[in-house]
Amino acid sequence: MAVTQLKQTNLPFYEERVDLACAFRWTARLNMHEAVANHFSLAVNDDGSKFLMNPNQVHFSRIKASDLLLIDANDPETMTGPNAPDPTAWGLHGAVHRNCAHARCVMHVHSIHATVLASLADSTLPPIDQNTAIFFRRHVVDGHYGGLAFEEEGERCSSLLADPKVKVMIMGNHGVLVIGDSVADTFNRLYYFERACETYIKALWTGRPLRTLSDEIAEKAALEQEDYPGQAERHLAELKAILDEQEPVYRN
């Protein structure tokens, strides 16, 4: 009944909101969130300047489709309104959506294993298995942490995502930012990046030499996984099916 009522009231971008609400809740289930911090956004117009984003300091596990803010990255009055987003979310996500139209969806977290990687002197992710190979030559390391991601820091970070092939920014001493074509594409990448980081960090724990893939095989594996049909969409569809059974309020 709640879903029907929302559709009847023409809530803007309803299906996109449902996808994003699912991603928030599942990120909390995976313990990849951080208290009431971290942010996801999704562009809803052609140039990416208008986007949906989570409300300020609401726990990921409680976010519903109707809670999401509709933000205009080019509106300087955004931060003066009663429903202003978190200032760091505005600084980082606003800059990425303004400057990188290919970044339709942006997800930023301080997940444990990605943040451990971001804390190493060398924060690159080597291709040591199938999951880490997904990110071969498709991630960039920002080694110039400058404090909280307000507008100046956001503009600097967005410049590192100019190459559409780069889908992940390891934010040195901070966390990770992942971009994609849709909620499904981006959440799937975020999920696998955290898994890949966990594999790498635990491999380092052994203190034994790593079996690193050759550049040729790593690139081949990355391309094969990019072309794998429908995996990201099916992943999100299954997560929504689980939430539909267990906590359908996310659609409200």
Image (cartoon, grey):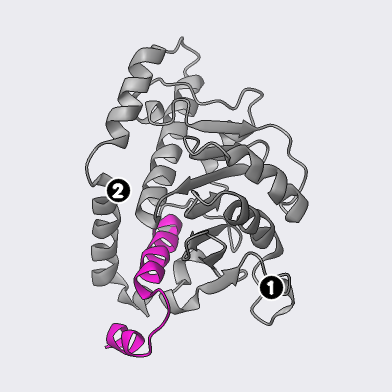
Which label's residue is closer to the chain start, 1 or 2?
1
**What's the CA distance linking mark 1 and mark 2?**
32 Å
Question: Hey, which quadrant is residue 193 in on the image?
Answer: top left
Give neighbour class at mark 1: few <14, some 14-19, many 20+ (Cα, 10 Å).
some
Q: Position of residue 184 (x, y in %)?
A: 35, 54
The picture quadrant where one finds residue 251 is: bottom left
Number of the front mark, 1 or 2: 1
The stretch drawn in magenta includes residue 177: no
Give the residue pinned by disc 2. Answer: 232
Who's the residue at 77% across and 47% down the image? 147
Instruction: Find numbered disc 1 in the image and state the secondary structure of the residue it sits on.
Output: helix
Answer above or below: position of 19 versus 127. Answer: below
Type of amino acid at the residue the image marks with label 2: Ala
Q: What residue is disc 1 on? A: 78
| Nearest to the observer: residue 224 or residue 198 | 224
Other residues around mark 2 within 10 Å, as few (<14) / some (14–19) / many (≥20): some
Magenta range is 1-28
Check disc 1 and give the amino acid type. Thr
